[in-house]
Image: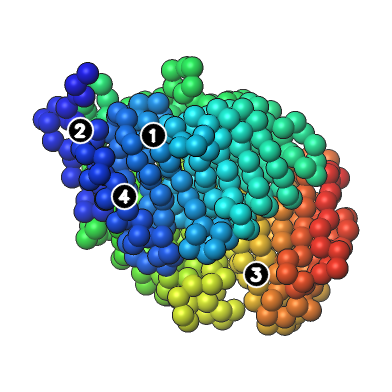
Amino acid sequence: TTPPPTSPSGKDPDLGPNTVIFDPSMSASSIQSRLNSIFSQQQSNQFGSQRYAVLFKPGSYDADVNVGFYTQVAGLGSTPDSVNINGAVHAEADWMGGNATCNFWRDAENMSVTPTGGSDRWAVSQAAPYRRMHVRGDLKLDDGGWSSGGFISDSKIDGQIQSGSQQQFLTKNSKMGSWSGSNWNMVFVGDQGAPGQSFPTYTNVPSAPVDREKPYLYIDSSGAWQVFVPAAQTNASATTWSGKTQAGTSIPLSQFYIAKPGATAADMNAALAAGKNLLVTPGVYHLDQTLDVTRPDTVVLGLGLATLVPDNGITALSTADVDGIKIAGLLVDAGTTNSQTLMRIGPNGTSAGHAADPTTLSDVFFRIGGATVGKATQSLVVNTSNTIIDHTWIWRADHGNGGTVGWTTNTADTGLVVNGADVTAYGLFVEHLRKTEVIWNGNGGRTYFFQNELPYDPPDQAAFKNSSTNGYPAYKVADSVTSHEAWGLGSYAYFNVNPSIVEDHSFEVPQTSGVRFHDMVTVVLGGAGTITHIVNSTGATVTPSSNVAYLTNYP
């Protein structure tokens, strides 16, 4: 069959210089050559400024799609099965000798893959979402060495998912033939074919109580470019698309302002004020004013790990307290002048309910230090009630370009502050902040999967002490909270600058029947440090000689 034209005018939209669009009429050799050139540039480009989106129009391709840093690969079909890759869509760790613990900031979405040899690989750690994928075979989540954290959502793996060395992983609203492997913290929410509840091996929650999948770009049957915005779901399980018609709304690309490298904050704000949505194409965008999202149901969608850098200490993005805003696919990289807050969802003090049309943050990542000397007191503040956090990594860098990392260099106190009621988080990765890393002040909060490393680099106990308490908790539920529940939480110590550092507990919560935690683990890594308790004064001490502790329920 003849593929439809790419748009009613027969022309592709201009998605900026760093978006590559393939169609099945192109020669396999030319496609492979372009893929190889992008991967060779990005394979070890951990803190560079290059960004890429590689998009495949509906059809079948013979290709080896190797995904490096700051690269998004995605199909442009209405379902993953509209695009099939015969070969591989994979992330390897060859550049680190099989160690995948630094395989960050990459993304595979909305494709099916028929893997050569029957098995594909996605060996990653944080900020590497695997969404709306269909693997016609097995999927391996490591590359023979260490791997430390990942996220799969809305995907179908016909064969077995093999977790290998993965220390912790979240699989959400997906379907698998089977799952093999575990270490500390394997969490499943709303999955079919996953192992049953069996902590400390597996945490299995049967459904996601409230969820909304990430918006995505696609070409409809008439050749028009659209962004599909999935509907919010309740008690969701398995995928949104396999064997069913996905619920949601399509927005024509004409209703988006397409931001390309060189676009200013003023350009984007003018478009937002005029009622447009934002499609931010791959690049690094320095902002001299806060992006102000005020219209209900606005979509802000980044391609290719599009990166916002707030200059002069401003907040990168803030929203009004309205229904249904969707923010997705962005990396916020703190600027060299300290920002009090990097992103604020809703103004302080708001209290309206948004249960019927929640705001959603999907694959929204934050970085303080690493590429440059970043500084931010707090990264993400959520004031709007009913917000869904659908995968975030808030990272104070523990390594980076020379001179960008250090206790008094890339300063950052808190990763996430939740003030809104009934906020739900799936895939909450928060690491290395200098004080309490997550502070939850709102009632009705729920977290499904929390992964944390404490800061590596406190110089001494005095620098890492909260009043009379040694250290700061990784996750604190405020004393005033009466209802909060969390499943599948891990916190790890690696105090390599001063191995004598002690943290009294990783979780600090009020002792009340409405605040409940399930399936927690603490670990001391690399023989450096001590965590005395898991939650409050409960749970075993972990030390270099006895380095893993579990707690199934609290209270």
| Residue bearing mark 3 | 455
Residue 169 point in image, percent of width and height: 63, 46
Q: How many angstroms separate mark 3 from mark 1 (CA)?
A: 42 Å
Q: Does residue 357 sit above or below 298 in this rendering?
A: above
Q: Residue at x 48, y 77 (%)?
A: 404
Residue 74 point in image, percent of width and height: 37, 40
Q: Which mark is residue 25?
A: 2
Secondary structure of the residue carrying numbered label 1: strand
Secondary structure of the residue carrying numbered label 2: loop
Q: Does residue 420 sit above or below 538 in this rendering?
A: above
| Residue bearing mark 4 | 35
Of callouts 4 and 1, which one flags the residue occurring earlier in the amino acid sequence? 4
Q: How many angstroms separate mark 3 from mark 2 (CA)?
A: 50 Å
Secondary structure of the residue carrying numbered label 3: loop
Q: Amino acid at mark 1?
A: Asn
Secondary structure of the residue carrying numbered label 4: helix
Q: Nearer the viewer, residue 288 or 199?
A: 199
Residue 346 point in image, percent of width and height: 47, 48
168 sits left or right of 509 in the view: left
Q: How many angstroms separate mark 4 from mark 3 (CA)?
A: 37 Å
Residue 504 point in image, percent of width and height: 81, 67
Q: Amino acid at mark 2?
A: Ser
Q: Quadrant of the N terminus?
A: top left
Residue 54 in view, yes or no = yes
Of callouts 3 and 1, which one flags the residue occurring earlier in the amino acid sequence? 1
| Residue bearing mark 1 | 86
Q: Residue at x 77, y 53 (%)?
A: 521
Of callouts 2 and 4, which one flags the residue occurring earlier in the amino acid sequence? 2
Of callouts 3 and 2, which one flags the residue occurring earlier in the amino acid sequence? 2
Of callouts 1 and 2, which one flags the residue occurring earlier in the amino acid sequence? 2
